[in-house]
Image (tube, helix red, strand yellow):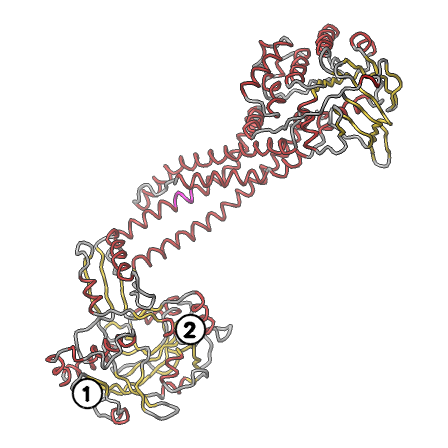
Amino acid sequence: MLELKKINKSYKTGSFTQKALKDVSLKFRKNEFVAILGASGSGKTTMLNIIGGLDRYDSGDLIINNKSTKKFKNIDWDRYRNNCIGFIFQSYNLIPHITILDNVEMAMTLSGVSARTRRRKAKAALKKVGLIDHIHKRPNQLSGGQMQRVAIARALVNDPEIILADEPTGALDTKTSVQIMELIKEIANDKLVIMVTHNPNLANQYSSRIIELSDGEIKDDSNPVEESEDDKSEFKIKKTAMSFLTALKLSFNNIRTKKGRTILTAFASSIGIIGIALILALSNGFQIQIDKFEKDTLSQMPIIINQQTVVMDNDTQSEIMDSMKVSDKSYSDSQEIHPIIDQQSVTHYNDLDLDYIDYLEKMDKDLVGGLSYVRTINMNILHENATTKKVEPIKVNMFPVPEVDDEPGAVMKDNFELIYGREPKEYNEAMLLIDINNGLDQNIFKTLGFDPTKTIKFDQILDQEFKIVLNEDYYTNVGTGFIPNVNYEKLYGNDNNITLKITGIYRGVEGSKFAQYSGNGIMYKEALAKEIMQRNEKSAIVKAQREADYNVITGELFDLSTKEGRLLKTNVLAAIGGETAPFTVQLYPKDFKSKDKIHDYLDKWNEGKSDDDKVVYTDTAETISSLSSGIMDAITVVLIAFSSISLIVSSIMIGIITYISVLERTKEIGILRALGARKKDIKRVFNAETFIIGLSSALIGIGIAFLLTFPINNIIENITELPNVARVNPMHALALTIINVTLTTLGGFIPARIASKKDPVESLRSE
């Protein structure tokens, strides 16, 4: 039973209010043919739209099978239209770009009926209206009467309780009108049919009840429902939902009707994909060539294990960098040196004892092309503290100047400059290297007797004098081993000492990355090391030690339980000329595959050890490879960033195209809403359209990019002799497809949302 209780409906146009329905109360039987008569503007269509759930009443209530609709939400009205209402419109309102079979199936599609059942019922409905032979035609291939029969079949196929017909014969000739009216009258035998018409002859001839409307009020009802006729039926309704596959089908069929525009749109939006795909193809190919070059040229670069190496986490590195920032201005003209954080605190000591060397030498010989050791010379340095005037042994950062034929090499000349004093010329002259901000390690400040919290003048450093004591004088054999002579004042005045003077202060040139990270300390000439070695070689202590048992130097002298103790032992042995653990080990892999296995072998030594006891190594080739890969990645990212602009432009263009499609398909929106489609279903239809365009443009772009790799490879090979550089990676192609589809869908999101919010009544009126 359908009932209208005091329904009111008004429309506002500016300040003018038009009352379409005024306190309309009506009851309808479960099955009857009701004709609603009235002049234009009397409220007939408004009443029909309110009964069909296309429009909302302002006040009153619509009762459906004894259930009030006052609290209905949008989704409830959608389900009501899909399950309970079948519309027959004057202008047919068929979706033009799908077949009549698909048009009839649409209502069932929205209510979740299976494909097989939909097809069977749709064919049965079309057979009933005499169109079974035309099921694969599109609406524009049918006559007016045939299209109205399709509309009737669509209205009946979901077995609704109510059929609403709005001027169903208004666009038909007399003969066809009679055929349609006979069909509708037959339907009214077991359903409620409510027909709006302005033709009283049709109403009198076919309907069982005539209701006359005038100015929104009921003027006459030829067969009103009596109270005794109340129907006790209960309201039952099924959910509606459009699958994404259905949305895709609708959108695909619509797109097919506009092939030219769709192809041009897809091609235009594919330009960004072509650019990015080619960049990635070239980047991928060049990276393969770089990897091949590195394997050919870097495979035998050494894996280096130093006795001391700097290991810094992010916090420590940040702290050191902050300590170097004495002002916003680098490379100041100030002739002062300021202390920076003690970097010894982040130094990792590798214990390269004889056990570790033995472990290295047991490595599979098929992996290693060479194994070399670098041993350093130990300098016994004494210095008179500038503050306390006491003679003390010191340990500072000492490293040789890179030289070629006793002259500074290209590394020094290109990256460092003398900023104070003069260049060292003699073997016993050295230079002080400070960092780019005039910073010097706090440890050196302390050992030189300066306050590590205050700056010092350049000339204060040049005034400093160091004494290098030979092993003959520095170590004493007391029967249990060799130990340092602690009478430093006496040693300081020994005639055999080498006096070391700092003659100049060097700093990295502005813009040099090498100098920026080179560290700081005292740099001596190689001639000094040769002089010390020659003098030590002649000393009696070395000769005696060569004849002695190295094991006399035991844990009694050194705390071998600590890394520092073991390091001291190593340095003492080096000082007296013994064959001991090296300062640096260099492993030369035979090839890149061997390099990975060597890594595994070295890592195995560290298993189960604490961080302090692990041996840290540096893979030179890996460092260079990561740098080259980083440069290639950076170039790729920059180029992709520029190309991505076209993707954004494409997304905006897709949004505009989708909005145009919304305007073109406004009537289709109204039809779908009349059939019970939800707002989200409408949104899904247009999202499906942008999905198709996005997918098409991605496939076109990747296809064109792939074809372009052939001439590009020919050009590159002619110029560089490198074959097949440009290579489209399938994973890149997949990623670009996903990105493009996502961007185009986002571009069409706003138009799709606009479409979902369109009023169904106004949409049905659009042309």
- Find numbered disc 1 in the image and state the secondary structure of the residue it sits on: strand
Residue furthest out toward the right: 219
Q: Which x, y percent locates residue 320? A: 43, 71
What residue span does the magenta drawing correspond to? Answer: 278-282
Tell me if 363 is positioned left or right of 753 in this view.
left
First in sequence: mark 1 vs mark 2: 2
Name the image quarter holding residue 411: bottom left
- Tell me what residue is drawn at x 52 percent, y 33 percent: 266
Q: Is residue 476 above or below residue 401?
A: below
Q: Amino acid at mark 1?
A: Thr
Compare residues 116 and 594 and report the one nearer the observer: 116
Tell me if 596 is positioned left or right of 421 in this view.
left
Compare residues 210 and 610 and report the one nearer the observer: 610
Q: Residues within 10 Å of mark 2 (few under 14, many from 20)?
A: many
Residue annotated with mark 1 = 476
Q: Which x, y percent locates residue 341? A: 42, 76
Q: Is residue 608 above or below residue 724?
A: below
What is the tally of numbered marks visible in this picture? 2
State the predominant SS element of the stretch in magenta.
helix
Residue annotated with mark 2 = 436
Name the image quarter holding residue 47: top right
Quadrant (top left/top right/bottom left/bottom right) for the C terminus = top right
Tell me if 436 is positioned left or right of 664 in this view.
left
Q: Which x, y percent locates residue 85? A: 70, 21
Tell me if 62 is positioned left or right of 76 in this view.
right
